[in-house]
Amino acid sequence: MKVILSPSKLNGTVSAPPSKSCMHRALICAAAADKPTKIICNSFSKDTEATMACLSALGARFEHSEGAVTVYPIDRNENAEECVLDCNESGSTLRFMLPFAAALGRKCTFIGAERLGQRPLLPLCQALNSHGVTTSYGESFLPCKIEGKLSGGIYEIPGDISSQFITGLLFALGVIGGGEIKATTPIQSGPYIDITTDIQNKFGISVEKTESGYKISEGQKYTSPDVFEIEGDLSNGAFWLVAGAIGSEDEITCTSLREDTLQGDGKIVDILTEMGADINRVGDKVTVRKSDLKGIEIDCSDIPDIVPILCVAATAAEGRTIFKNIERLRAKESDRVQTTADMIKALGGQIEFDENTITVTGRALKGGTVSSANDHRIAMSAAIASLRCSGDVTIETAEAVSKSYPDFYEKFIILGGKCNELCDR
């Protein structure tokens, strides 16, 4: 479908949706625990629904109630039949569930949609192959079949391709009763692993950080905390904070943004502050007012998910904003280096990139037609960019937002955004 957005100003208060990163991790830990866990979460995305579907195929059960879901863990004593795990478009689901299912000793076939089969997976499969599990994964395609039961020991894996490899192995080591992960290259996106180890700790698994990786000592088991509340998502809250900085009529307040969060995308507040945004924080509420921004240099190593929306902010900044260490953006739902550049150019902005750097020069935007490339973050970034445009912005494949933020456009309209037309392609 297409969404057509006319120039508008936003103001008001909006709550950040539940953290997709935290929800994936809590669901998996709860499915491995000793008794049911009630997870407080008032909405779900396609990605977290994919994780629940895979856990269901492995034997977990879910009971939904208002604002929560109760997870009934997998019975590991049952004789389980071979199953198919559909990860849809979720890279987190695939990379987390692959070692998790192998730790359970399950014979499974993993399938997915869109670009999922093109996203890096081979190093993870090689690590599983070296510890008792057979995988059918080739260089770049799903389906992937696994068979065998994962053994303990030392797992060596690159740290600079995806932190999700390490997270998936940590989940598995918690199931099999311990082991060690050694990163053979420097670890990128370390904050995502910090989220993993923090949630594992709340479910009874203590993870030791070593010089080259992580270690789980023998004899530990997942235990339910009974109730677990999902915090707000900083990567999606970032859209509203940028909206406040570049185009609000009065001010925008985004709630449910924990100040002590381990989410790497929490850096959005510091980055916008450095750019000159007028930001006030009180507890989990962050209020942003339109202000004069200036270009800065931004290291993107740990924040690949918020680069597209920061590029939108950079169009409103005086001078040049330079985004460094962008390599990992190419292996997302789209090649986000290219699709971010295409979005900014389509709206009349100035953006250039090379292998390691994106440079945005501040200038007025005129509007235009943007293809989301079926990437939720490109679609939402284009919607926020419409606040700076002199003409309409048309977003093609606008429904991509359902991957992480199904009611994004509803929130946009509630805050005063103008969504002139919603139509089929």
Image (tube, helix red, strand yellow):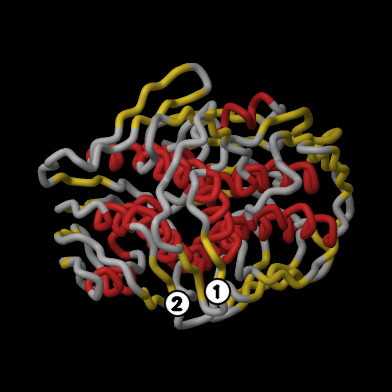
Question: Which residue occupies the foreground of this view, 45 or 418?
Answer: 45
Q: Position of residue 353 (x, y in %)?
A: 59, 75
Question: Which residue occupies the foreground of this view, 292 or 22?
Answer: 22
Residue appearing at x 15%, y 45% in the figure: 83
Q: Which mark is residue 364?
A: none
Quadrant into which the N terminus falls: top left
Quadrant into which the C terminus falls: top left
Question: Which residue occupies the foreground of this view, 39 or 414?
Answer: 39
Q: Which mark is residue 210?
A: 1
Q: Amino acid at mark 1?
A: Thr
Residue appearing at x 56%, y 42% in the figure: 19
Alpha carbons under labels 2 and 1: distance apart: 8 Å
Q: Relative to 140, is 9 above or below?
A: above
Q: Position of residue 212 (x, y in %)?
A: 52, 79
Question: Quick check: can you spot residue 303?
Answer: yes
Residue extending farthest to the front is 219
Q: Which mark is residue 182?
A: 2
Q: Nearer the viewer, mark 2 or mark 1?
A: 1
Q: Amino acid at mark 2?
A: Lys
Kindly indicate the quadrant of the structure image that contains residue 147: bottom left
The local secondary structure at tag 1 comes to loop
Residue appearing at x 23%, y 46% in the figure: 85
Taking 329 as reference, is 141 left or right?
left
Question: Quick check: can you spot residue 400?
Answer: no
The local secondary structure at tag 2 comes to strand
Q: Are marks 2 and 1 in contact (CB under 8 Å)?
A: yes
Q: Position of residue 375 (x, y in %)?
A: 46, 51
Q: Position of residue 23 (x, y in %)?
A: 49, 41
Characterize the local packing of mark 2: few (<14), some (14-19) or many (20 or more) Cα atoms within 10 angstroms: some
Q: Relative to 398, is 413 above or below?
A: above
Residue appearing at x 89%, y 54% in the figure: 292
